[in-house]
Amino acid sequence: MQNPLIVDAVRTPMGRGKPGGALSGIHPAQLLASVLKALVERNDLDPAAVDDVIIGCVSQVGEQSASPGRVGWLAAGYPEHVPSTTINRMCGSSQQAVHFAAQGIMAGAYDIVIAGGVESMSRVPMGSARLDRDPFGPGYRERYAPGQVSQGIAAELVAARFGRDREALGAYAARSHQRAASAREAGHFAREIVPVTTDNALIEADETIRPDTTPKALAQLKPAFVDDTMARRFPEIRWSIHAGNSSQITDGAAALLLMSEAAAARLGRTPRARFAGFDVIGDDPIAMLTAPIPATRRVLRKAGLDLDAIDHFEVNEAFAPVPLAWRKAIGADDERLNPCGGAIALGHPLGASGARLMVTMLNALERGGGRYGLQTMCEAGGMANATVIERV
């Protein structure tokens, strides 16, 4: 069995996903092309040697409907014989793309693969794929309709279930911005960010970080998901979820270059990490956001590691209750959880987020001399991916 290795990992800056955002003028395929070109050029790689390009993207409609990986690869000017496929495991799409790439190498199907993701939420808004149509159908609705809620309500339910009040959520959200701002000021994102050229600017830094965010300021924001009907339906909820303690709508792309151990040795490439464990699991589709908890437990067992062996945890900050509930259930050290900030500060470009988390985690392990990193993220439908990497 071939051993899959991470040779390099890059991302774009994160742009606010709205008209006028720093990256909103860039077609998503072109945004993806920027990270694909960076991987090829930084590693003096012959693009003709790439076996596949596996890309995560959630809203595969409009400008993201023509298999973004294929279009992005060709837009970068690279060989037509290299194929691509697009993955949708909702918010975990690009993390799953990395899993499939690594597992393809393990199976002997690939030697060199690029895996990553892209989402331009300013150009293809979240929910565009549904339009006015029912994405669930009668069988699912018959089973789950009585309890079906939005992700925002699910976040409220998780906060109530795990005893995370509005003050705790505000403190966590402000901390995310503060940690991200500190990381940016210290130059910690420099190696992972690929500058993007727009029509009138060179975008080199994340647009989403707000270092002046405070718990006091967040306390003034109104809950986003409560109305009279929801208040009557869920009397146990304290209604604490708002834009300030939720992930930001964002534009971005990220990608990793994976090689088999044999290919890396043949090409003289020094690997940066290997994979120690993979997991993907389903959980309650109503609570929806709790699957990272069982995914973490299973991936640790698969990797043969205990919690204390992990130097860095990345838990996607879809909403502040997600990492807080995960930390309470798992018992992880707060200082090792999202030490560079998370999606509350850096944003959540749906299909790109899994790869973005891995890019940031890998660079943080290298800076701090850590050995193992564990990444997990909740996904719509009550799923979660988990990955353990080992720095080499």
Image: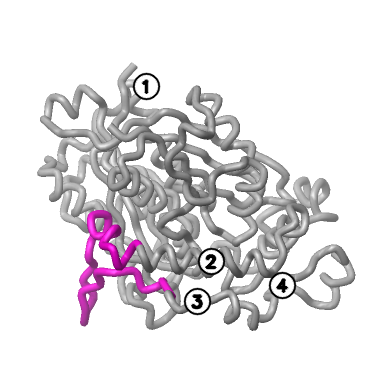
Where disc 3 sits, the SS reads loop
List the residue tagged with mark 3: 213
User: Which residue is painted at 58% across and 81% down in the image?
Assistant: 217
User: Which residue is painted at 28% across and 63% down in the image?
Assistant: 186
Label 2 and label 4: CA atoms lie apart by 17 Å
List the residue tagged with mark 1: 107
User: Which residue is painted at 12% across and 30% down in the image?
Assistant: 267
Where disc 4 sits, the SS reads loop
Name which of mark 2 and mark 1 comes first in the sequence: 1
Q: How is the image coloured?
A: one colour
Marks 1 and 4: which is nearer the front? 4
Q: Is residue 379 magenta?
A: no
Label 4 and label 3: CA atoms lie apart by 22 Å
Name which of mark 2 and mark 3 comes first in the sequence: 2
Marks 4 and 3: which is nearer the front? 3
Label 1 and label 4: CA atoms lie apart by 45 Å
